[in-house]
Image (cartoon, coloured by chain):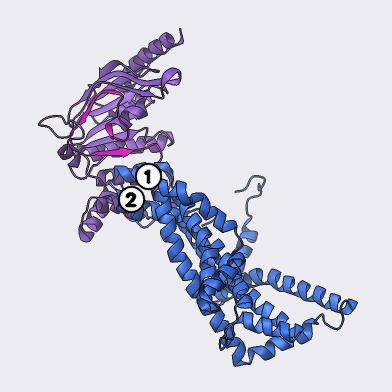
């Protein structure tokens, strides 16, 4: 569980992808919860390769083990079989902002720098920069409960960026937001990613959101979770969630998902 | 505009309202602030004043009913007695001695309770061993410790402090343990992802997250400490240290009902003051965390 700097690669607890930073590899990974007759196979023989800098969206119906997959990559859980390799640091964003209520917005971001051992002046300056990046420059002194849902999730994004990770895992981060706010945050995420070499694995059950954001969309089946298909997204940026190419590809992916779900129902 | 409010403001009514608003502005802001503050103070005070008046009235009625006429004190002379005692150095000295014991005993209980709570909450075998013992101690009336403590330490301040600590520390430890236990798992995951480990996890995440439960434990611990202290001062009288308990037992020996009642009122008021301080701390935390309805 040690993850200080690149300690994860140094301690050799987990294999790393050779020669590159920010890559994620899963080799026939399975995860079973429980034992005997009550055992639940959440993930079955999942193989997935995410090259550095790619924005991969995972999509599937509920129960496809999306969150379990992220927990494995984040080293919060261990696979039952198979191999998970990650090179570089990992940050994780949840559906809830999970901000610390006793700290201000700036305090929350700053704590991530503090955990990394950054000095006081550096922390202050880089926190201000990050809050500016997520358009919250004037809200650093507010406490989480004084911010709107969208603002809180932006603070959470700034906090995740402050962890200076190479791999950013996002677990339905905009799932609890209204459509308008989500749309704004999509633009913001695009802008933030443009300036960084970030590998992103983004879990969602919203097909259009996946097509709007991802370089690639990976479709998972439910119970057990398996990779059943994947789609490259060859649509130019900037994209709009309501544009024709996005809608067209989203439609094809939805058809594929429906087909899979009717299989499951039989 | 509120639903149902369909009439549009006609021009004359509007001008009238503007004039009225300007008239309001004629008052200086300092006046307004002063008035608002007075209003708020009055809103908080009148229920208390009324409650005290009702208590005094019932007290007076009991006196008038003639029940235990010779010994039951009347409110008037009792309050006069309290006023007289407040002019004497003896009462203030006694309050000083008692308050000092309360502060020292409670401070020691906070330190000991916090250390025990921190250790027990983080070390599972220790919790299995002494977790239920702490809860057991919490329910044990601390006055039961006095014979034990008097034999062990003799009739002195150490005995009183010992019993205060045994009374208060379990509540404080349990408050901290509850706070640690109820740290939201999501925040723990977030903290671990940020790279907080062991001590830093404790310092930057678990301790602040436990603060509300810890303050609740402090509050309860204080109530136990204050009771233990009063019991101790009645049982353990030390020459040359006129505490509130000593004054009370002297009154008992001399059957001085008015003075005894005065001292009880003093003890009650001291308890209310400290309780109010804890209330202020509690509200400040709630406001900071956004746990109150209005901010």
User: Chain B: what color?
Assistant: blue
Which chain has been coloured purple in this picture? Answer: A
Q: Is residue B48 magenta?
A: no
Q: Secondary structure at mark 2?
A: helix
Farthest residue in the right direction? B65
Q: Residues within 10 Å of mark 2 (few under 14, many from 20)?
A: some
Question: Is residue B16 or residue A78 the one in the foreground?
Answer: A78
Q: Secondary structure at mark 1?
A: helix
Query: Where is residue A192 shown, x and y percent of the image?
Result: 25, 40
Which quarter of the picture shows residue B194? top left
Q: Which residue is mark 2?
A: B201
Tell me, yes or no, whether the two marked residues, 1 and 2, touch with CB atoms within 8 Å. Answer: yes
Q: Is residue A98 magenta?
A: yes
The chain carrying label 2 is B
Relative horizontal placement of residue B15, taking residue B61 as reference (left or right): left
Relative horizontal placement of residue B206, taking residue B256 as reference (left or right): left
Q: Which residue is mark 1?
A: B188
Question: Is residue B237 or residue B44 the one in the foreground?
Answer: B237
Farthest residue in the left direction? A19
Q: Residues within 10 Å of mark 1 (few under 14, many from 20)?
A: some
Residue B228 higher or lower than A133, as above or below: below
Query: Where is residue B185 shown, x and y percent of the image?
Result: 41, 42
Relative horizontal placement of residue A106, taking residue B183 as reference (left or right): left
Classified by dominant secondary structure, the portion drawn in magenta counts as loop
Query: Where is residue B138 shown, x and y percent of the image?
Result: 56, 58
Q: Which mark is residue A187?
A: none
Which quarter of the picture shows residue B43? bottom right
Residue B169 higher or lower than A261, as above or below: below
Q: Which residues are magenta?
A: A73-102
The chain carrying label 1 is B
Q: Is residue B107 visible?
A: yes
């Amino acid at each position: 569980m040690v993850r200080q700097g690149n300690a994860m690669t140094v301690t050799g607890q987990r294999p790393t992808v050779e020669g590159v930073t920010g890559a994620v590899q899963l080799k026939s990974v399975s995860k079973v919860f429980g034992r005997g007759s009550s055992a639940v196979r959440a993930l079955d023989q999942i193989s997935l390769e995410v090259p550095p800098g790619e924005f991969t969206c995972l999509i599937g119906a509920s129960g496809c083990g999306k969150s379990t997959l992220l927990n494995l990559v984040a080293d919060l859980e261990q696979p039952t079989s198979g191999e998970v390799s990650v090179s570089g640091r990992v940050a994780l964003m949840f559906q809830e902002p999970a901000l610390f209520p006793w700290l201000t917005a700036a305090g929350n971001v700053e704590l991530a720098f503090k955990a990394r051992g950054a000095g006081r002046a550096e922390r202050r300056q880089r926190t201000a920069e990050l809050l500016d990046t997520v358009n919250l420059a004037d809200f650093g002194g507010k406490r989480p409960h004084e911010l709107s849902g969208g603002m809180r999730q932006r603070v959470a994004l700034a906090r995740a960026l402050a962890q200076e990770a190479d791999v950013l895992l996002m677990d339905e981060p905009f799932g609890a937001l209204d459509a308008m706010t989500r749309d704004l945050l999509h633009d913001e995420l695009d802008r933030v990613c443009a300036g960084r070499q970030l590998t992103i694995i983004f879990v969602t059950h919203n097909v259009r959101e996946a097509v709007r954001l991802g370089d690639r969309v990976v479709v998972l089946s439910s119970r057990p979770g398996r990779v059943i298909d994947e789609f490259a997204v060859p649509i130019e940026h900037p994209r709009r969630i309501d544009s024709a190419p996005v809608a067209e590809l989203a439609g094809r992916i939805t058809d594929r998902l429906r087909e899979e779900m009717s299989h499951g129902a039989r | 505009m509120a639903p149902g409010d369909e009439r549009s403001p006609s021009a004359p009514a509007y001008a009238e309202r503007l004039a009225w608003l300007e008239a309001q502005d004629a008052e200086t802001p300092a006046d307004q602030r002063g008035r608002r503050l007075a209003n708020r103070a009055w809103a908080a005070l009148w229920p208390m004043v009324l409650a005290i008046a009702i208590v005094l009235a019932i007290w007076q009625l009991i006196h008038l009913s003639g029940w235990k006429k010779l010994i039951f004190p009347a409110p008037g002379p009792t309050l006069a007695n309290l006023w007289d005692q407040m002019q004497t150095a003896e009462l203030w000295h006694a309050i000083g001695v008692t308050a000092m014991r309360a502060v020292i005993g409670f401070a020691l209980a906070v330190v000991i309770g916090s250390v025990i709570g921190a250790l027990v909450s983080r070390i599972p075998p220790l919790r299995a061993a002494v977790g239920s013992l702490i809860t057991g101690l919490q329910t044990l009336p601390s006055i039961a410790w006095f014979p034990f403590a008097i034999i062990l330490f003799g009739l002195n301040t150490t005995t009183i402090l010992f019993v205060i600590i045994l009374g208060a520390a379990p509540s404080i430890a349990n408050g901290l343990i509850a706070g640690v236990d109820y740290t939201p798992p999501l925040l723990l995951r977030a903290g671990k992802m940020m790279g907080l480990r062991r001590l830093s996890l404790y310092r930057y995440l678990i301790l602040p997250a436990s603060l509300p439960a810890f303050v609740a434990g402090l509050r309860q611990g204080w109530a136990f400490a204050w009771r233990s202290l009063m019991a101790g001062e009645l049982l353990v009288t030390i020459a040359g240290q006129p505490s509130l308990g000593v004054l009370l037992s002297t009154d008992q020996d001399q059957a001085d009902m008015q003075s005894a009642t005065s001292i009880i009122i003093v003890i009650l008021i001291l308890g209310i003051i400290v309780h109010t301080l804890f209330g202020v701390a509690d509200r400040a935390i709630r406001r900071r965390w956004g746990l109150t309805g209005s901010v």
